[in-house]
Amino acid sequence: MLTVTLFEPQIPPNTGNIARLCGANNVKLDLVGSLGFDIDDRYLKRAGLDYWKFINWEYFPDIHHYCENTFNKNFHLMTTKSKRLYTNQVFKENDYLIFGSETAGISEKILTSYPDNTCTIPMENKNIRSLNLATSVGIVLYEAFRQING
């Protein structure tokens, strides 16, 4: 089973939409670090509708502890700071697709420690810094499905 990991998500509707996407596809969702909202946030619940009970998700308060346990597995760090396209990554069953917060992305320390695990979604307009987090997760998740399922 694939896992989508969100480091310190800040916007409840993004997390709710991602949770719904994960639930619809039997993908685990890991929320890691300081969240920009309360798990009981009404906007989070609204974006996930009444599907939360069908979503396999877990909260991990400590990013460093999570990384220690996860970075010995196959993982992909999604960032605008990579030149490697997500379509050139090799995705496999049980991989971790890791995304940073909407405001800060994934820390430079993590990115520079694992440069071979980084990849990006290309954008033509260089005036746009990044895509919406929920959109990015959808793009990469479905590419992983395409590769895994043929």
Image (tube, helix red, strand yellow):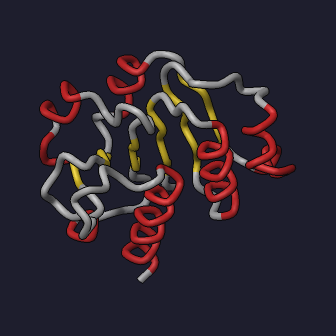
Q: Is residue 12 left or right of residue 131?
A: right
59 vs 45, left or right, is left
Instruction: In the displayed orientation, state which residue is furthest to the front.
Output: 127
**Image vertical order of residue 103 relative to residue 123, above or below:** above
User: Which residue sits at x=32%, y=23%?
Assistant: 68
User: Which image quadrant for residue 92?
Assistant: bottom left
- Is residue 36 rendered to the left or right of residue 116? right
Residue 13 placement (x, y as % from top left): 66, 44
Outermost residue, right side: 50
Q: Is residue 139 shown above or below 99?
A: below
The image shows residue 67 at horizontal and vertical percentages of 34, 27
Residue in the foreground of this view, choosing between 16 and 52: 16
Q: Residue at x 25, y 49 (%)?
A: 80
For image coordinates 39% across by 17% down, the residue present is: 65
Q: Position of residue 10 (x, y in %)?
A: 54, 31
Residue drawn at the location 65% of the way across and 48% of the way down: 19
Residue 16: give x, y in percent of width and height: 68, 45
The picture quadrant where one finds residue 127 is bottom left
71, above or below 125, in the image? above
